[in-house]
Amino acid sequence: MSHFQGKNIVITGGSDGIGKALVQQFLGLGAKVATCGRNIEKLKALESECASEHLMIFTADVSKKEDCDAFIQAAIQQLGGIDVLINNAGISMRALVSEVKVETLKQVMDINFWGTVYTTMAALPSIKERKGVVVGVSSIAGYRGLPGRSGYSASKYALNGWLEALKTELYGSGTHVMWVCPGFTSSNIRNAALDKDAKAQGESPMDEGAMMSSEECADHIIHSIEQRKRTLVLTFTGKRAVFMNKFFPGLADKLTHGFFFQNGRLIK
């Protein structure tokens, strides 16, 4: 029997990428799943594709506290409680600090950081009662600031720090808090990434085919939740970046700049 058989899993941003893969895999493991997203058409397509009576969909924008509160309360009412909350909803950006508008930075922070805060605080009483798990889907950018992604990096650093503080507050309570940091993963996140004017850039400058699939990433996340790991850093490149930044920060600056820039121009 699966570890997650009959468990109640709540996932934000479940209509695309890693979130969608998590929804599908948890349902396959016998869990009951509630997920939210901003696009009702994508949520309906997910519902049709999964064709499961154990899936609840809900339209919500996680940057709005009232949407998060409504989603969590609906999930608790329908599922009966929350065993695992996965804060997956997120957005990226691509713009130099010298060019980006504050609106872009604010929108990224509202979704990536405040969205996690809103849903977690609403769900925490139920999770604590069931000695469950809070998960934040962070990023390598939460350990290493990335050029062109200043707001994204800031949001993920903030996310890691907030979750670590929560984890420490709950130490010994039986409630687990963890953050997972995928490296570059093939998904829609770079297509939807905001440009300097807070508009979706519409295309990815990266080689998506060379990246870890969303399905493989979701599989790693699920195993890490079952094992109640403290953190999860994925891909060789991601682990190398975290190691280099910790022990050789000056060299990490040089290598990171070389990866993202060519002839003084941001190319990735």
Image (cartoon, rainbow, N blue to C red):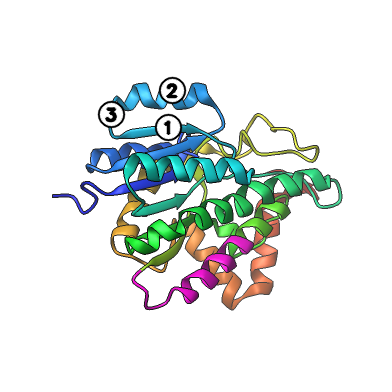
Look at 36% across and 51% down and name the residue there: 82
Measured along the vertical axis of the image, is residue 209 above or below residue 68?
above
Q: Amino acid at mark 3?
A: Ser
Q: Quadrant of the C terminus?
A: top right
The image shows residue 144 at horizontal and vertical percentages of 62, 63
What's drawn in magenta, residue-wise? 157-174
Q: Earlier in the sequence, mark 3 or mark 1?
A: 3
Nearer-N-terminus badge (2/3): 2
Dot 1 or dot 2: first in sequence order is 2
Q: Position of residue 47 (x, y in %)?
A: 37, 26
Tell me the SS state at disc 3.
loop
Q: Can residue 105 be seen here? A: yes
The amino acid on which the numbered mark 1 sits, given as a three-letter code, is Ile
| Cα distance in 3D space between marks 1 and 2 | 8 Å
Q: Quadrant of residue 67?
A: top right
Please identify the dominant SS of the magenta region: helix
